[in-house]
Image (tube, rainbow, N blue to C red):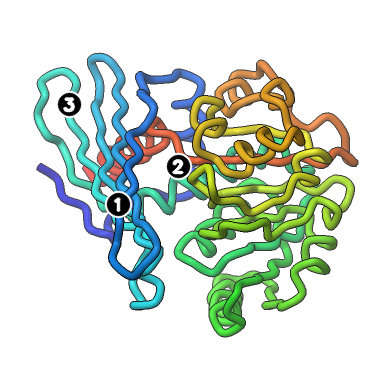
Amino acid sequence: MLVLDERQTHNALPMTALIEALRAMFVSGCEMPVRHHHTLGVPGEPDATLLLMPAWQTGQFIGVKIATVFPGNSARGKAAVNAAYVLISAASGEVLAMVDGGELTARRTAAASALAADYLARKDAGHLLVVGTGRLSLNLIEAHAAVRPIRWVTIWGRSPEKAAAVAEKAAAAGFETEATDDLASAVGHADIVSCATLSNEALVHGAWLKPGAHLDLVGAFTPRMRESDDEAMRRASVFVDTRAGATREGGDIVLAMQSGALAQSDIRAELAELTRGEHKGRTSDDEITAFKSVGAALEDLAGAVLAYETAT
């Protein structure tokens, strides 16, 4: 059995190849039950989450991710998300690989955002705003830069020190960067706004978005969490990774539907429909688009297969 640690998993998932692996998997499809989602109490801290995400392609591969989300870990200087991924042969049932789930999740999540942006962001989008300073921040910068000519990156976070640290790392990767404490102004200037937080309240207001902006909503993976307000959902053409997941678990979608700001029929398409050419995505340079992801098991399977094949 192949075992890939965090560094090896990162090296086995080059971003451009990963985006294309996800594109191919969304086109072909796979068996993908809605993930198991369990809330776990943690004494004296916010609730944690246990996620079980299976997927398989008949006769090819089976994969299962076991993931935990412990928001209280940030106070301990530990990652909020931890995971392991098991890749199995669907021809023999043999375990083929154990892949670092945290790195797989971070890489494939960012790749899914970039894949959506390839259909939804303006072709000339050059200014990226990243809202959040966690593990996904640098991955999102790398991913969006793989599909759009990103020249300028702005970082906002609740901690100015963490925002500055992410900006410094992005600068070392070759981007013109700045950290900001003025989120409204930053949103108003950005071509792509990419949010990856554990926020329970709206951070990005729809009124701040400029014509032609693309809003990428990665966090808010439970129905009680959200990163955007109702006005953002009203103004934007809304797309999701999967309808089944986003309308049940994505707080930005669920809460907007509960308030009446968004109807299920307002969701223009999911990623499979975009990749198959069943919806063209962005229709004009002035259109505001929004993409909400909650994570799909086929993304993990595509990434794990790529990592296994790259490493072997």
Mark number, residue 59: none
Mark 2: which amino acid? Leu
Give the residue drawn at x 65%, y 71%.
Answer: 156
Taking the image as drawn, is residue 110 in sight? yes
Taking the image as drawn, is residue 10 in sight? no
Q: Quadrant of residue 287?
A: top right
Q: What residue does disc 3 label?
A: 89
Residue 173 pos. (x, y %):
55, 71
First in sequence: mark 3 vs mark 1: 1
Residue 107, relative to residue 152: is it above or below? above
Q: What residue does disc 2 label?
A: 18
The local secondary structure at tag 2 comes to: helix
Of residues 82 and 167, which is closer to you in this image? 82
117 vs 43, left or right, is right
Circle nearer the viewer, 3 or 1: 1
Residue 136 pos. (x, y %):
49, 59
Which quadrant holds the C terminus? top left
Residue 80 pos. (x, y %):
38, 63
Give the residue drawn at x 84%, y 57%.
Answer: 208
Give the residue drawn at x 9%, y 42%.
Answer: 1
297 vs 3, left or right, is right
